[in-house]
Amino acid sequence: MKVKILFVLFIITAFVLGACSPAPVEEPVVEEPVVEEPVVEEPVVEEPVVEEPVVEEPEEPAVEAVELRFMYYADGPKQDLILPLIEKFMAENEGITVILDMVPYQTIDEQLPIQVEAGQGPDLARITNFAIYKGKLLDLRPLVSNPEEFEANFATPILEALGYGGFPDEYTITGPYVNQTLFEQAGIDLPTGETTWEEWTELTKQVAEATGTDYAIGIDRTGHRVAGPAMSMGATLIDDEGNFTIDTPGFRQFIELLKSWHDEGLMPNELWLTGDALNNCIDWFKTADMVMCMTGSWQINGVAADVGDAFDWVVVPNPTGAGGSTGIAGGAAVVAFADTEHPEAAAKLMEFLYAPENYAALSGGGLSLPAHRGVAEAGVDYASDIPSVLAALDAYTAEVPKLQDQAVFLNVHPFAFAYYRNSANRIAQYLAGELSLEEMIANLQSDIDTAIAESN
């Protein structure tokens, strides 16, 4: 009992002591002062604005205004073809203006030589008399971009005759046109194979009589057209030394045949006797008043347009004889003159015109035979779907391999003008009975010799 009381007293005492002891002291929570890092602002360093220097583009020098005068005669539709080409050239060559002066052939033949001699000629022209401008044309070889191509595409004799100052813009061949419908109406077959001028004369006479046609046969009033038949009959108009020789058997033979056409009324008197150097038989042929007309390839387009479907016509091979069968090669050329003030611009225009695509456009639209080898080899898209036209072009093309050497050389002969200028008038005097054949031949030879002597 005593022990139990003691245990209770012990518990009470412990409780009292526990209650009287001091409360536990909490350690103060010392908050570390928040030391804010000073915000050091980076100084804003403004970079200086460096203005890019304004570099002014150098002003292009003003394109020098260049004016080229181009004297041009057109046969057939070439006038309508050359105009858009010139406009195209000017559009591609800023600063170059081309004044295209369209003139009749008579101006080219008579006035242009005088203007050039006086130093008042154009910059460029389309010509046919090559020799008269010897030494007066601009050598294009140092000026064009590809002189090798220029030389390769055109016949060397022609380029040499032009002093490399131009290029032939077409090739022409002389040859006869025949009214096929009249032959059919007369019941006479067109001859095939080799046929002489005498045989054609007799055939056309029969056709004219059977059909009541006014004239059987004719030839243009020019020594150029006469040369082909004369050479076919054996004439040597140009000898091995390049001299003109009128008095040969072949020349006499054809001139006498021509006289028979006149005397028998087979061709109109006014064709040769009016004194007009531009008289040609094609006018009578187009109206079906002549059975056969000796002219050339440049007439194809005109015949096609003017005849239409009025009658059928064909180009036949040149009649044959002791000299074979030959026409005369010819054609016009575009040239630049040496005294031009703008040689580079003139050469640029020339190069533009003989570029294949432009040259082909003139050949195809003008229905002319190309003298440009590249264009000829590529073929020309002729602006015609008329069978007779395409057949005529083929017929004239077939004449090219048959050409005599003198037939090619004649048109570019340095003294061709001496023959051309005098032959028609002298032959006309013979036809009219004013001169005998002997007198005509002697006078014509003298005229030629004198003209050559005076030109030297």
Image (tube, rainbow, N blue to C red):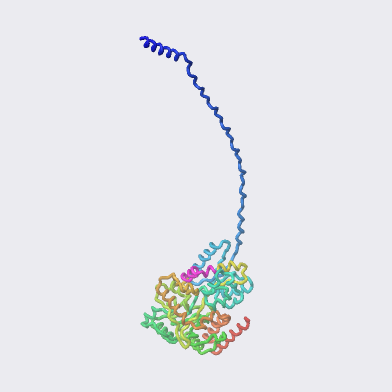
As for residue 362 lying within the magenta part, the answer is yes
As for residue 236 lying within the magenta part, the answer is no
> How far from the left and from the top, in percent, is residue 14?
43, 14
Relative to 442, residue 91 above or below: above
Identify the residue at horizontal 53%, vertical 26% (top origin).
Answer: 31
Quadrant (top left, top right, bottom left, bottom right) of the N terminus: top left
Q: Quadrant of residue 41?
A: top right
Span highlighted in magenta in the image: 350-365
> How far from the left and from the top, in percent, is residue 278?
52, 77
- Residue 289 visible, this orientation: no
Relative to the observer, which residue lies in front, 179 or 376?
A: 376
In the displayed orientation, state which residue is furthest to the right: 118
Total numbered circles: 0
Relative to the observer, which residue lies in front, 340 or 139?
A: 139
Residue 53 lies left or right of residue 202; in this view the side is: right
Relative to 35, residue 141 above or below: below
Secondary structure mostly seen in the magenta stretch? helix
